[in-house]
Image: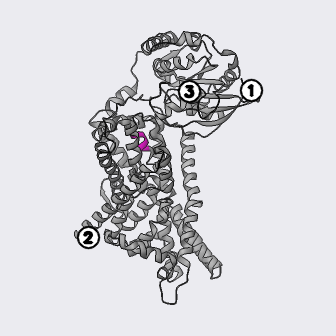
Amino acid sequence: MSAKRTAALVGNPNSGKSALFNALTGARQKIANYAGVTVERKAGRLTLPSGAPVELLDLPGSYSFDAASPDEAVTRDVVKGVFDGEAAPDVLILVLDAANLEQHLVFAQEVLELGKPTVVALNMVDLAERDGLTLDPEALSEALGVPVVPTVAVRRKGIAELTDAIAEARSHADEEAHTRWHLTLPERRLTAKHIARSAILSKSTRHTIENGVDRVLLNPWIGPVILFGLLFVVFQAVFAWATPFADALEGGVGAISGVVSERLPEGLFRDFLVEGVLAGVGSVVVFLPQIVILFFFILVMEASGYMARAAFLMDRLMALVGLSGRSFIPLLSSFACAIPGIMATRSISDPKDRLTTILIAPLMTCSARLPVYAVVIAAVIPQRTVGPGIGLQGLVLFALYVAGIVGAMVVALVLRSTVTKGAASGFIMELPRYQLPRLKDLAIGLWQRAWVFLRRAGTIIFVATIALWVLLSFPKAEPGESQLDASLAGAVADTLHPVLEPVGFNREMSLAIIPALAAREVAVSALATTYAVDAEDEDIAAEGVTAKIAALWSLPTALAFLAWFVFAPQCLSTIAVARRETNGWKWPTVMVVYLFALAWLSAGATYWIATAAGL
């Protein structure tokens, strides 16, 4: 190998490359049990038994070097050494799914044709054994002409042996590989079948439980009902399970605020801590339990294998608006954050499908909107049940998520009928086997999500909140004058308010949507800071933002604010990623304009209807 040694993980989607990358490097790369998790190359450090370092690349899953999508093009270019001027990897680690060997061996032949030093990681052998397959790694190695190491990446089995094989791989370059493996696609399929059969020592005839489960979950009538029922339970749990923890956090923030008010003398520094930091940032942090519960369900669905089934089920619905089930996974990723969702569109081969998915991804309700929804719903929607185990607050939250999905489908239909017109592309997806999520992986995933949320609270939200506090605090109001009226922020609100007043917004709401462009959650901290600064005494200032909204907002006004955030444009980071993925400002501009228009119209319609109904 060269002085700067590199190795790359290659293989079909859902073969366990990211899990193997984590096991080999110790990195906490995202592990999800559906195709398309890795949408760009990622690097980590692998240490060989000799102590020598190797740069390990985790490449997107690919079915062929004849790239049909941007993520497959990344894999092809990196492996062949034409990616951004970088040299080709010294060693290729070909990852095969042991229980789906025949299909994965088709692409394996393309990799072997390159003649590069290659090691095969026969991954997920535990699941193959569970399904009644007993494989012979030596027979497979003899047929392929390269070392084969059985692995179970998520349990770190075979990792030491694989590392040894990588260290010795320099002697396995095959000069005759191009001649041996240069076959047509039909020939490769036939060869894959023969090799897979020769590597199977025994095969049980018993049917796995998941075959029966899939007959129910993938039923075109029962499956969607189960899917939406599961999502309904998720949003019920977000309120029902999180309430005690959120109340405890809110009480803690209130107690700290009280101590600060008592111990520090009156002045600018105390106002900064109470009105800016604690009232603003603290009002967002209290929604950490809701975020954790939401991602717990998402991670369980990913790790168990159900997420791929959900994409399969949604293919029929997506076809009605001119898309395919392949768009579902990026859209589903956007429920966490639109940024990885937009990046995941690289797995979509059709350019018009991909552009449409990018443009509607912000309509998926990202986790940053959850604090906004939660605080307003808790303030104006009664905490009561409307049926056995069905809470009204959870029902409203579910309705907001459904509104975003319906809005996305309508916009997709309009786009596919006009500017991105074209036939719906086909959808073929490998369904992973069911497996129990590992507690360690769930814990790591939840910690990552919680840390991202808290980091945003300590950076973007903190900076935006303090900037707003400064604008709200100066110049100082005269005795008897509202601080909001006297402040610079008040002048900004007065400028924007005439545009938003017709849809039911008050000045505080008009002001809150400006810093919310930095991050959706900032709307909560902005409202909290605004009400704290404008409060006439410290007891009122110490009240939570939920209590202030409950006391000061009418129900039509609150519903209009919720409707605005269903459609309002995402944060500036999302817009920047959309610009990068579309190679210009044209489509991000279209995205921002239509989202603002939808937000204004939906907020207005909600306010006008609610007012007319006497709510």
* Residue 381 in view of the camera: no
Q: Do the residues labelled 1 and 2 touch (CB within 8 Å)?
A: no
Helix, strand or loop for disc 1: loop
Give how far apart the Cα atoms at labels 1 and 2 are. 72 Å
State whether residue 555 is above or below residue 168: below
Q: Does the magenta stretch include residue 331?
A: yes
Q: Are marks 3 and 1 in contact (CB under 8 Å)?
A: no
Precedes in sequence: disc 3 or disc 1: 3
Q: Does the segment drawn in magenta span residue 428?
A: no
Left or right of 39 in this view: 348? left
Q: Where is residue 214 in the image (x, y as percent from the top left)?
A: 35, 30
Identify the residue at image location x=57%, y=17%: 112
Residue at the spot of label 2: 611
On screen, residue 110 above or below 407: above
Residue receiving disc 3: 10
The amino acid pointed to by label 1 is Pro
The residue tagged 1 is 49
Name the foreground residue: 189 vs 202: 189
Q: How crowded is mark 2: few (under 14 residues within 10 Å), some or many (20 or more)?
A: some
Residue 614, above or below 208? below
Give the residue type at disc 2: Thr
State yes or no: discs 3 and 2 in contact (Cβ < 8 Å): no
Mark nearer the N terminus (1 vs 2): 1
Quarter of the image containing the N terminus? top right
- Give the answer, above or below, for where 128 lies relative to 367: above
Which callout, 3 or 2, points at the residue further toward the start of the chain? 3
Q: Residue furthest bottom?
A: 479
**Residue closer to the observer: 9 or 532:** 9
Find the magenta span and give its range. Answer: 327-332
